[in-house]
Image: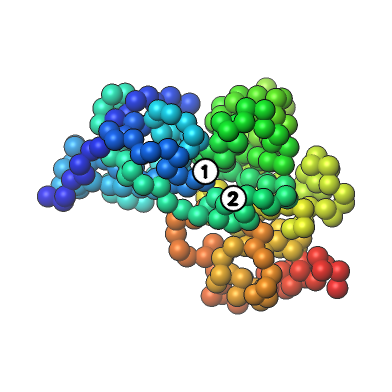
Amino acid sequence: MAKLLEYNATLAERIDVTDALTVFRIQPDQPPERPWFVPGQYCVLGANNAERPELGSVRRSMSIASAPEDDGPVEFYVRFVSKPESENPLTHLLWKIKQGERIYMRPVAAGVFTVKDTVGLDDPRLRVMVAAGTGSAPFVSMVRSELRRDPAADLSKWVLLHGASYPGDLGYRDELKTMVDKNKLKYWGTVSRPKDSPGWTGDTGRVESFFDGARLDDLEKRLGLAPGGFNPSNVVVFICGLTGTITGTVVPLMDRGFVPDFKRIREALGVPPETKDSVFYEQYDTEPVINIKDPAVVEPLRARMQAGLAKLSGV
């Protein structure tokens, strides 16, 4: 039988947002001294397969939604994977765990998808956070941390674009709307299936559609930027979601001179070494989100990237 995990934490609380979206609040047996992580980092959760012990255990990386300054349980926002690629999917085990039951949580955080490790804490540009589904978790951690340190903090340079299938899937929406009213956070949720949500009056379409043509011009106006002002001089972009969300954001922003933080993609697109990255995304996989081995894919994107950089430099 495969080696089992030694449980070291308890599920203190679970909040089922929908049948497929749940907030898990996990209390480690030996809480690390706070702050033990940086907003934007992830932690590893794991469980043993009690029903099929021959499959052993499974562990997965999950972004932390709570702020590092928070006392008590550590929060994770998780989607149930209905069509898993693995024979032993973690979410199928998590959904069977009840409040008060045991779980594994690695007491060490990891990852460099943080403001500190990307542009630096003193960077003055607008921070546009693009989230699909549970991809909002690291961004919720970031803005929560700002408010834990100063409840009256000015969040006007923080912009959260959150996409989901239905309004009910926009987790943390009420909390974020409060930040809009009290702290000047810029937040817009968008739903991709508006026909099934007749009462919805907000934005529609996938979250990456904010960057398509006229939609980007509209976003620019909402942010108070001059025409063409949505560029790396004024904006830095963070993305957390599936590959489609990442590529659907990265590619159109090349036309504005935004450079993705991925060495192999930069090289394939001919980005000069001295040009700084301006689009950052969370990705546990080491493979590029763009097929850089296919000339039919790379060459048109290289031309767009070069044109975007030239336009940005005024050439």
Residue where numbered disc 1 is placed: 39
Asked if marks 2 and 1 touch (Cβ < 8 Å), the reply is yes
Residue 37 drawn at (x, y percent):
45, 44
**Point 53% across, 52% down: residue:** 113
Whether residue 229 is situated above or below residue 22 in the rendered picture: below
Residue where numbered disc 2 is placed: 115
Q: Is residue 119 left or right of residue 20?
A: right
Q: Is residue 76 left or right of residue 159?
A: left
Residue 132 drawn at (x, y percent):
57, 43
Q: Amino acid at mark 1?
A: Pro
Q: Is residue 274 visible?
A: yes
What mark, if any, has residue 243 been given in the picture? none
Residue 143 drawn at (x, y percent):
60, 36
Whether residue 199 is situated above or below residue 259 in the rendered picture: above
Which element type, helix, strand or loop, lies under badge 1?
loop
Disc 1: CA contacts within 10 A as few (<14), some (14-19) or many (>=20) = many
Whether residue 233 is situated above or below residue 301 in the rendered picture: above
